[in-house]
Amino acid sequence: GAVVSQHPSRVICKSGTSVKIECRSLDFQATTMFWYRQFPKQSLMLMATSNEGSKATYEQGVEKDKFLINHASLTLSTLTVTSAHPEDSSFYICSARRPRRGNEQFFGPGTRLTVL
Amino acid sequence: AQSVTQLDSHVSVSEGTPVLLRCNYSSSYSPSLFWYVQHPNKGLQLLLKYTSAATLVKGINGFEAEFKKSETSFHLTKPSAHMSDAAEYFCVVSPYNNNDMRFGAGTRLTVKP
């Protein structure tokens, strides 16, 4: 199956700093990637849809200025959490949609963000 | 609009006994339905998916699910639970182009020896 990677897998940062998380599709080109957030013992919530070469589409309630998404190439999308606060601590998961072949989404392993 | 409801937040079974994880969906069009499994601190693994072909879908690790349109259900089953099946399971609905996947709240499966 298709492989999606995330980097880093785990990051700890101080309050007020910015953190960048990378999502890569390793063996296919993804015009669309998705970013999800998962709080402990809860389900995944879609944050935004990232489209290559255009602006991301954010879900209601997600601050676009706080969660910056860049989809600069067909294999890479980045999520930058700006001015992080402890309440931003969460598990962030990306997925990449493989065009054709059923448009299936493939999920990355996730990034655990802890803001001190 | 589309959504899924996982009817049990926690299911506990004994090893070797059947597993039933329930999922009901709501969709204004013919949906695609998925079951994913997530082990602690791990990413999501696709167990199986329904995309308007056969209503009984067989997945990995002995899991299967049946799409019942009349009941708007997509319950996940396995004849005999294994200790390694203990994990969180998510039922997911999306439109045909998979552009908008909506996750259920999840069901935590515990397997007792």
Image: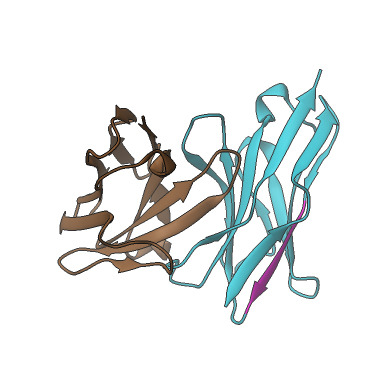
Chain colours: A brown, B cyan
Q: Which corner quadrant of the image does residue A88 belong to?
A: top left
The magenta segment is: B22-27
Which residue is at 74% across, 46% downward? B9
Taking the image as shown, residue A67 lies to the left or right of residue A102, namely left
Which residue is at 35% across, 41% downward? A85
Q: Residue furthest bottom?
A: B28
Q: Can residue A73 be seen in this view?
A: no
Prevailing secondary structure of the magenta residues: strand
Name the spot of residue B66 as percent of width and height, x first.
73, 59
Name the spot of residue A107 as percent of width and height, x first.
41, 46
Taking the image as shown, residue B32 lies to the left or right of residue B79, namely left
Name the spot of residue B59 as percent of width and height, x first.
62, 46
Instruction: Give above or below for B26 relative to A30.
Output: below
- From the image, which quarter does the C terminus of chain A lie in? top left
Q: Can residue A65 be seen in this view?
A: yes
Taking the image as shown, residue B99 lies to the left or right of residue B112, namely left
Q: Nearer the viewer, residue A21 or B50?
A: A21
Name the spot of residue A33 as percent of width and height, x first.
31, 57
Instruction: Give above or below for B63 relative to B23.
Output: above
Task: Please tell me whether residue B106 belongs to the stretch shown in magenta.
Answer: no
